[in-house]
Image (cartoon, rainbow, N blue to C red):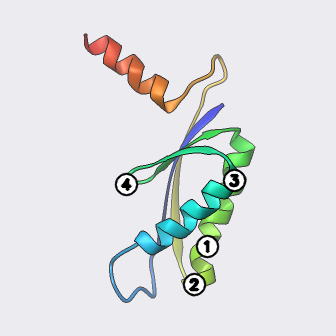
């Protein structure tokens, strides 16, 4: 199972600096996918099959173009661990235990 962090930002053609409308559109796509995710203030963390995640990210990346954007930058960070099942929660828990 993969853990992926994604951030999608349209760059040109915005009349103001708020991106929340575009984030909401991307999250709607993600919700329909059925993948487990966590929205954060700086990006979204998605857990699941890597192929499913990447296909969904492609749809999310395309969504600002449907509203007239001419340029979109998408940043993706992938943690694809194959020796055991990893989750976002488990990774945080591991660090917390080591802090005790």
Q: Residues within 10 Å of mark 2 (few under 14, many from 20)?
A: few
Residue 1 lies, in percent from the top left, at 66, 31
Q: Alpha-carbon neighbours of circle 1 within 10 Å: few (<14), some, or many (≥20)? A: many
Q: Mark 2 points at which residue?
A: 67
Under circle 2, the secondary element is helix
Task: Tell me the CA gap for discs 4 and 2.
Answer: 22 Å
C-beta proximity under 8 Å, tags 3 and 4:
no
- Tag on residue 33? 3
* SS under mark 3: helix
> What's the distance in space between the residues labelled 3 and 2, CA to CA?
21 Å
Disc 1 to disc 2: CB gap under 8 Å: yes
Task: Between label 3 and label 4, give the one nearer the viewer.
Answer: 3
Compared to residue 90, the image places residue 53 above or below, namely below
**Mark 3 vs mark 4: which is more N-terminal?**
3
Please tell me which residue is depicted at 43% across the width and 53% down the height of the picture.
43
State the residue at coordinates (48%, 66%): 23
Would you identify the image quadrant in which residue 50 lies? top right
Q: Look at the picture and state if 44 lies above or below 84.
A: below
Q: Where is residue 55 in the image (x, y as percent from the top left)?
A: 72, 55
User: Label for residue 42?
Assistant: 4
Upstream in sequence: badge 3 or badge 1: 3
Badge 1 marks a residue whose secondary structure is: helix
Spatial separation of the CA atoms under disc 1 and disc 2: 7 Å
Q: In which quarter of the image is residue 32?
A: bottom right
Q: Which of marks 4 and 2 is nearer the N terminus?
A: 4
Q: Which residue is disc 1 drawn over?
A: 63
Residue 99, quarter of picture: top left
Image quarter hosting the C terminus: top left
Sequence order check, earlier mark of 3 and 2: 3
Left or right: 12, with 15 as reference point: right
């Amino acid at each position: 199972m993969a853990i992926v962090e994604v951030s999608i930002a349209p760059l040109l053609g915005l009349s103001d600096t708020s991106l929340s409308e575009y984030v909401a559109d991307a999250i709607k796509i993600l919700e329909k996918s059925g993948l487990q995710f966590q929205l954060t203030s700086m990006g979204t963390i998605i857990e699941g099959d890597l192929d499913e995640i990447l296909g969904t990210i492609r749809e999310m990346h395309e969504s600002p173009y449907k509203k007239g954007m001419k340029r979109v930058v998408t940043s993706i960070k992938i943690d694809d661990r194959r020796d055991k099942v990893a989750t976002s929660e488990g990774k945080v828990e591991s660090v917390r235990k080591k802090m005790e």
